[in-house]
Amino acid sequence: MKKKWITASTILALMLAMTPVSIAQPRHPRIHAAMQALRDAKEELQRAAHDFGGHRADAIRAIDDAMHQLEICMKYD
């Protein structure tokens, strides 16, 4: 029984060691960076003291639409 556990543990350790490092990193770093920039811009727009000449609401909707499209794109990656 102990030998089976050691064998299984060894196999698991080898599988983890052979896992590509790229899994931890996004495949499309510019898209992920753009998504973060859009989130930051939306937050800034929402917290602003003025409405940017009446364009704040439209800008927030455009950000939401862009985020939605990027999320769809990433599903097909």
Image: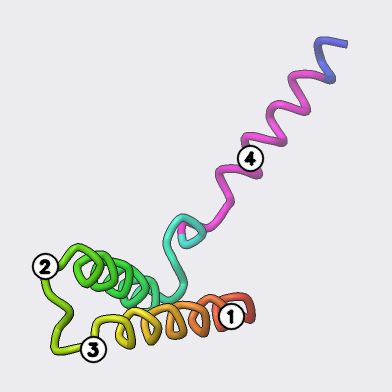
Q: Is residue 66 left or right of residue 7?
A: left
Amino acid residing under circle 4:
Leu
Going 32% across and 68% down the picture, which residue do you hit?
Answer: 39
Which tag is nearer the camera, tag 1 or tag 2? 2
Q: Give the mark nearer the N terminus: 2 vs 4.
A: 4
- What amino acid is found at the position of numbered circle 2 in the picture? Ala
Disc nearest the viewer among 3 and 1: 3
Dot 1 and dot 2 residues touching (CB under 8 Å): no
Q: Residues within 10 Å of mark 4 (few under 14, many from 20)?
A: few
Q: Is residue 18 above or below residue 63?
A: above
Residue 8 position, x and y percent, is 77, 28
Q: Which residues are magenta?
A: 5-21
Q: Provide residue 68's location: percent of width, then percent of height.
A: 51, 79
Name which residue lies at 33% across and 87% down.
58
* Predominant SS along the magenta part: helix
Q: What is the residue that sits farthest to the top in this orientation?
A: 2
Q: CA distance from mark 1 to mark 4?
A: 34 Å
Q: CA distance from mark 3 to mark 4?
A: 55 Å
Task: For label 2, count other residues whose C-alpha is less than 10 Å away and answer few (under 14), some (14-19) or many (20+).
Answer: few
- The residue that label 1 is drawn on is 72
- Residue that label 2 marks: 49
Q: Which residue is mark 3?
A: 55
Mark 1–mark 2 distance (CA, rounded to whole Å): 32 Å
Q: Nearer the viewer, residue 32 or 16?
A: 32
30 on left or right of 26: left
First-in-chain label (1 vs 4): 4
For residue 14, which numbered disc appears in the image?
4
Given contact means CB atoms under 8 Å apart, are the residues at marks 3 and 1 in contact?
A: no
